[in-house]
Structure formats: structure tokens, C-alpha cells
Amino acid sequence: MIKNLSIIAAGTIIIGGVILFAHHRSKIEIVPAGDRAYHDAEYQFSLDYPADLNLNKTDEGGGASTLTFESADGTKGFEIFVVPYAESSVSDDRFHHDEPSGVRNNLATTSIDGEVVSTFNGFNFALGDTYEAWFIHGGYLFEIATTKDLEAWLREILKTLTFTK
């Protein structure tokens, strides 16, 4: 009888330890080698990005910011523009305000951490042809863009984007 109780107690301790380890392990962030983690408390998201990119956050006023991730030589990078937005979808007026070229080719829908994301090829007068991903989360419109030739590279980075709230 005592032997059986000892086995049950030991089993309970082992199972409890496994559950506790699994719980703590899920809270540990593992950043892939060669990457850095970025956490934004204001806009409540995080992502991993290549360590060779420099990060610059510019306050655009009115609660908006532009985050630029760019290599020192300027050959690789992407930007995230975030602006307060109370609508549930991006209006045509908002799109044309933020994308003056009006180009929105190859429109597709995907998801990032449970949010519906519109992706498309656009045109930016400074960058040329672009790959963009736009979505709304937590009262903000996120507009993420890079040059079209870096689409696959940016897609991999966006796989790491998660919302902290």
C-alpha cells in the first residue's frame, strides 16, 4: 500500500514538473541565430528581424510612427507604418491617402497571428515597385512595405510577427 502511494506521489511530481516546464518553456522566446527580437509596447507587437539591419523609429505625430529596418548599405530593408485607425477595414480614401500611386495589384488575403492581412504589389515613388502587407489590429492600421524583389524575404520575417495583446 505504501509502495503504491509512493509510486503515485512520484508520478504526480513528475507529471507536475513536466507541465510546469512546458508552461515556462512556452514563455521563453527563442530568437533564431542571426536575428534580433523587436518588441513594441506602444503598438503591442513583436517580430524577429535580421541582425544586420538597423532600426529607426520615427514619430509621425498623432500617434503614428514609422519603423524602418534597413541594412547599412541600404540594399535591404522594410518599413512598418502604424497609425491610429478606428475602422474595421481599410477604406478606399485611406488607401489612396497612404498609397498616392493608387497601385494595388495581385491583391491577396493571408493572416498574421490571427489577423486578416491584405497583401499586394504597389508602387512607391521612393522605392519603386513594392510588396505590401496591410492589416488592422488593436485600433491601429499597420502598413508594411519593402521592394518587390524582397517579397519572399519579408514574408519570412512576417511569419515571426506576433501580437502581445
Image (cartoon, grey):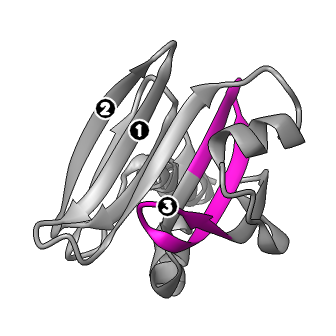
Q: Residue at x 77, y 52 (%)?
A: 114
**Residue 151 percent location from the top left of the image:** 53, 81
- Can residue 3 be seen at all in this image of the molecule? no
Which three-letter amino acid code belongs to the residue tagged 1?
Thr
Q: Main secondary structure of the magenta part?
A: strand
* Residue at the disc numbered 1: 66
Q: Mark 2 and mark 1 in contact (Cβ < 8 Å)? A: yes
Left or right placement of residue 28 versus residue 115 in this view: left
Place of residue 58 in the rendered image (x, y in percent of width and height, measured from the top left) = 31, 32
Q: Amino acid at mark 2?
A: Thr
Q: Which mark is residue 58?
A: 2
For the N terminus, give its image quadrant.
bottom right
**Where is residue 93, by image quadrant?**
top right
Q: Which residues are magenta?
A: 122-143
- Distance Cα–Cα, label 1 vs label 2: 5 Å
Residue shown at the point (56%, 72%) measured from the top left? 130
Can I make out residue 50 in this image? Answer: yes
